[in-house]
């Protein structure tokens, strides 16, 4: 379940997450587990953020080929979310097989804006837009995106 499933073109209407200027989506399958769910048996909404953070880590490691743990650990560069929008469209239950995806909407000097989604087949379960900002973990101040991250982003097909 943790293999790279797609870096494929999607339209701006597919899953409602990709912007017209970011036609490629990085996706991973995920099975909804007991730990994701609340007593009602559906995904407890903050768990989606945990799932999407895992997707961002996979994207850095497997798509950008930049070690996410290397950024945070030895390099002391954080990538916190500074802006977050979420829309919950349908419930997910334990045992559901879903696909998490992300597309780059914008790259700034110190930030990356990502459009993200969770879907089961063609049914959109949730979508999110997140702005990540590179920070110096010593000062907790914004800094320019590292050169290797910027170069990896520039290599992504458009």
Image (cartoon, helix red, strand yellow):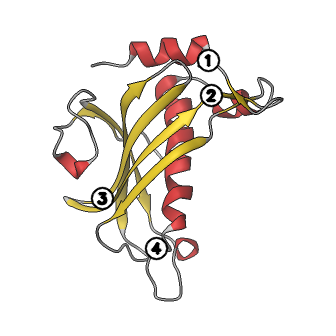
Side of 13 relative to 5 (left or right): left
Q: Are marks 1 and 2 in contact (CB under 8 Å)?
A: yes
Q: Position of residue 57 (x, y in %)?
A: 57, 39
Relative height, residue 22 to residue 15 (above, below): above
Q: Are marks 3 and 2 in contact (CB under 8 Å)?
A: no
Question: What is the distance, in whole Å, between disc 1 and disc 3 at their CAs?
Answer: 33 Å
Return the residue at label 4: 43
Mark nearest the camera among 2 and 4 is 2
Question: What is the distance, in whole Å, between disc 3 and disc 4 at their CAs?
Answer: 13 Å
Return the residue at label 3: 119
Pick whichever, 2 or 78, lies toward us: 78
Question: What is the distance, in whole Å, between disc 3 and disc 2 at their CAs?
Answer: 28 Å
SS under mark 3: strand
Could you say which quadrant of the image residue 25 lies in? top left
Q: Earlier in the sequence, mark 4 or mark 1?
A: 4
Q: Earlier in the sequence, mark 3 or mark 4?
A: 4
- Circle 2 crowding by C-alpha within 10 Å: few under 14, some 14–19, many from 20: many
Return the residue at label 2: 134
């Amino acid at each position: 379940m943790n293999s790279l499933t797609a870096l494929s073109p999607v339209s701006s209407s597919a899953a409602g997450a990709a912007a017209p200027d970011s036609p490629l989506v990085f996706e991973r399958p995920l099975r909804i587990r007991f730990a994701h769910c609340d007593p009602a048996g559906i995904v407890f909404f903050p768990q989606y953020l945990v799932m999407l953070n895992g997707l961002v880590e996979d994207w850095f490691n497997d798509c950008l080929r930049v070690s996410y743990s290397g950024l945070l650990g030895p390099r002391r560069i954080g990538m916190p979310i500074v802006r977050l929008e979420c829309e919950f469209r349908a419930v997910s239950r334990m045992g559901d097989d879903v696909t998490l995806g992300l597309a780059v909407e914008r790259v700034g000097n110190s930030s990356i804006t990502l459009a993200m989604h969770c879907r089961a087949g063609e049914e959109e379960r949730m979508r999110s837009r997140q702005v990540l900002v590179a920070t110096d973990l010593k000062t907790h101040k914004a800094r320019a995106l590292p050169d290797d991250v910027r170069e990896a982003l520039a290599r992504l097909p458009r």
